[in-house]
Amino acid sequence: MSKFELKLPRMGESVAEATLTSWLKEVGDTIEMDEAVLEIATDKVDSEVPSEVEGVLVEKLFEVDDVVKVGETLAIIEINGSADSTHSEAASSKPAEAAPVAAIAAVEKSVAVAKETVATPVATAKSSDRFYSPLVKNIAKQEGISVVELDSIHGTGKTGRVTKKDILAYVARRNGQGLETSVPVTDNKISENPKVEHASPPQKISEPITVSRVQSSGGDEVIEMTRMGKLIAKHMVDSVSTSAHVQSFIEVDVTNIVVWRNKVKDTFAVQEGEKLTFTPIFMEAVAKALKKYPMMNISVDGDTVIKKKNINIGMAAALPDGNLIVPVIKNADQLNLVGMAKVINDLANRARNNMLKPDEIQDGTYTVTNVGTFGSVFGTPIINQPQVGILALGAIRKMPSVIETNEGDFIGIRSKMYISHSYDHRVVNGALGSMFAKAVADYLEAWDVNREV
């Protein structure tokens, strides 16, 4: 028998750690290859960590709410059979040699800072070197907990780290007793430290703006927001506070597209093994418009504008639990219609099954949301920061329309839809915002009904 170390996999360039949210297997359970062993959460996405081997879980190295760095061993799995154990034993006996020197130094520094912080908490500090997990930071932001308050919370986790239970317990006490006007001190020996004793007196915490709380009656059902729901709510509020939202609306005749899709969708499914929806057609139009108007493919950084090199289109997708996620189609302008359809179907399917990787929802430069899926004629979507625009696709409807011909005008039935363009008026004026939306509409209306797939 040999032992296999299940490590936290790499989850994108900007993700260095994750919070362990739950164990799906217990010690002694049999694990199949590619079967999920635990769930993790980052600031970007929740995901599962599957096993690379078949065997039995013999040891867990982290607990729920612990923060794990990329490359660290999460669990030990005992493999049945005559697998080569020499390599595994060598790898487990010298983990320090396999790990990068920089990563080791970072871990040691984090541990040292945590120990120092627990030993002598300084409640009057305006900022802190104390380590907090992404989950704890998010809860602190949502509850309006200042850095000074956060530093004062006694942690029960490893090396005194503040866990989810610690901060939720603090929030419960805080809400029940009201806000403290002075900073609580968790270590009664702090006055023995001469540096702290002679420091300036603790600053008073400024009273926040009082927000009326909704009271529930006896027959009401109180539903706790999910972690993702809280993140989305904060992201939306932050976006409205950041960008000056302006909208433009255009009616688009998509009759040719409807006729063409009805003609080729069965053949497409047989040839490509994929379902042909309207979404890849719309995404192709948006990619072409972004190429024509590159100043819609930008981000704002203070007083500067960052013009993006790649066209990465985010595709808002509704999840079964009611939440929303935005997987990103990377380099969308380089995909043909078949490639676009395959990428979109793959991302949509894995989004619904919570199988997206963190780097698949990052680096978007523009976003499209299909509100017509749920019957909406048009919408006014909120910009996905730090982007400067988002396009909403309305429902396709058959409508009476004036048709111009050489023989005169007449009334006919046409398939039409509205596209709604929300853009950041700090850097995108009405002319650019409207011209971009018109470019998308022109491309869709000029669709060739004889186009080959």
Image (cartoon, rainbow, N blue to C red):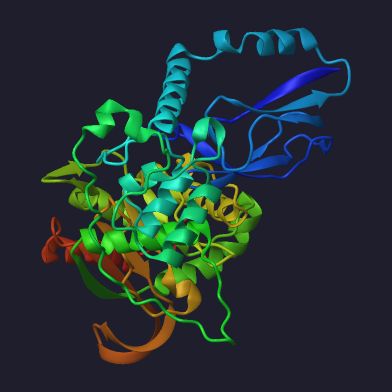
Q: Is residue 45 left or right of residue 21?
A: left
Which residue is painted at 26% across and 48% down in the image?
291
Figure check: 241 above or below 356:
below
> Is residue 95 in sight in this rendering?
yes
Relative to 149, residue 317 above or below: below
Residue depicted at 57% across the width and 43% down the height = 65
Quadrant of the rendered image containing residue 379:
bottom left
Placement of the N terminus among the 4 image quadrants: top right
From the viewer's side, name the closer residue of 104 and 214.
214
200 to the left or right of 418: left
Q: Position of residue 313 (x, y in %)?
A: 37, 51
Image position, residue 418 (x, y; %):
33, 76
Nearest to the observer: residue 135 or residue 389: 135
Residue with the most extreme front position: 192
Q: Nearer the viewer, residue 412 or 242?
A: 242
Q: Find residue 395 and report its horizontal and vertical position in percent.
A: 43, 77
Question: Is residue 44 visible in the rendered structure shown here?
Answer: no
Placement of 85 over or under 164, stated as above or below: above
* Left or right placement of residue 63 versus residue 414 in this view: right
In percent of width and height, residue 343 lies at 51, 48
